[in-house]
Amino acid sequence: MITPDLLEFSGCSSREAIPVVDREPVDYWDVPATIQPNHFVHKSLSNWSFNIAIGCSHACRFCYVPSAATIKMGALLERHGIADPDAEWGEYVLLRRWDEKRFLASLRAAEQTPRSLLKPDGNRAIIYCSTTDPYQAIRHSDPARQRELAAAARHVVRRSLELIRDHSTLRVRILTRSPLARQDFDLFRSFGTRLLFGMSLPTLRNDLSKIYEPRAPAPSQRLATLQAASEAGLHIYAAIAPTYPECDAADFHATLSALRPLDPVTIFHEPINIRAENVQRISRHAARLGVPLRTDVFATRSAWQRYALISLRTMREIAQELGLLSRLHSWPDPALGSTATVQSQPNPRRYLEELHKNWSRISEWPENQRPAF
Ligand code: SF4
């Protein structure tokens, strides 16, 4: 059961109904939350990740996380009643416990890592979060249990941020889809230029988002949260990621135009990439809803490449038109650098140069931000 005010605030009231399961896989996870080196490839988001949970209640159908990380924990997840971590993605949230001593040890290890050992594109930053959302709504059929878990999640996020601020020189990048982040704007502001606040905003179309991200807050609420963050004096960025096959030039134009007045430090963009079972997840979901989606773009490698390249190119053209090209940080998938793809381009050398330019780009921080447009 979910309290109406939480639903209202998290934007879930008109979204997909929450199925009731016999044993709710919304619980604690024994391993505490610590700062861990991450393994981003060409993303320039951070050097470390801080993940508060295994699983994510937003249930994005395209999510890469189950294939990349969670699925490896199959045996442990089984103990929580999760038989298929990929198929059941979105149904489980296992909150990492708070252990201040262990957190501080991980913070010291990160702080003391010699800069020469760090990838410069990580900006000495910790991302909240890379495999879950730091401000997701916790849903449990028992209201008391729900309140307890939500309070525990909030404590893990706030206390860890306070310790990073006061005991390190590291930077923080917040990435969320939830307006619940507003409750921590005061804390974010106390970091000054050490913290960037960002929203994932693949589209402004609430109807499309409801299909691809069935339990995440609506894009209109995310945009309003970014606007509030900007008004609160926070340094913001956006991840138009991943854009769906149904997102056309008009859609890209609308999203970039809405972001422009907020003066984002960086705007990341990528289309949906194929990872393990995410395409099957999207197709199953579309069939269940009886909604025709453009899953044909995932049918073959070449169909996906065409969709990915058109998306990346279209977003760049519109960013240029709106004077936002210097802020746009495209994320072309490494698969787009295969020999066959490169050779199939009208100008392979230029195409390859462009890919490498994006892959080696270091994302901006307020201290070294480009002049306003
Ligand atoms: S918010 Fe991120 S981690 Fe959560 S389901 Fe969506 S894509 Fe996955």
Image: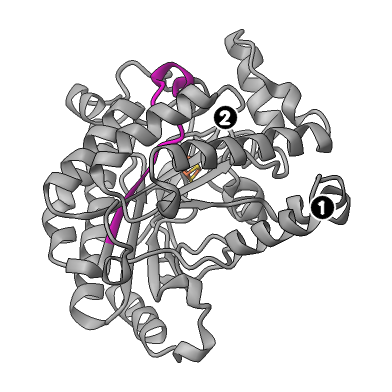
The quadrant in which residue 52 appears is bottom left
Quadrant into which the N terminus falls: top left
Residue position for label 2: 244
Q: Which mark is residue 162?
A: none
Colour treatment of the image: one colour
Number of numbered discs overlaid on the protein picture: 2
Please tell me whether residue 129 belongs to the stretch shown in magenta: no
Q: Rate crowding at label 2 as few (under 14), some (14 to 19) or many (20 or more) other CA atoms within 10 Å.
A: many
Give SS at disc 2: loop
Q: Residue sitting at 28 percent across and 61 percent down?
A: 371
Ligand 1 has an atom within 8 Å of the beta carbon of the residue at disc 1: no
How far separated are the C-alphas under marks 2 and 1?
A: 23 Å
Examine the rendered structure and indicate whether residue 70 appears above or below residue 166. Answer: above
Q: Residue sitting at 44 percent across and 88 percent down?
A: 113
Amino acid type, callout 2? Tyr
Q: Position of residue 171 (x, y in %)?
A: 31, 72
Residue position for label 1: 342
Q: Which residues are magenta?
A: 196-210
Amino acid type, callout 1? Val
Q: Position of residue 281 (x, y in %)?
A: 65, 30
Which one is earlier in the sequence, the residue at label 2 or at label 1?
2
Work out whether residue 99 can be spotted: no
Q: Is residue 248 left or right of residue 95?
A: right
Q: Residue sitting at 80 percent across and 54 percent down?
A: 348
Examine the rendered structure and indicate whether residue 143 appears above or below residue 164. Answer: above
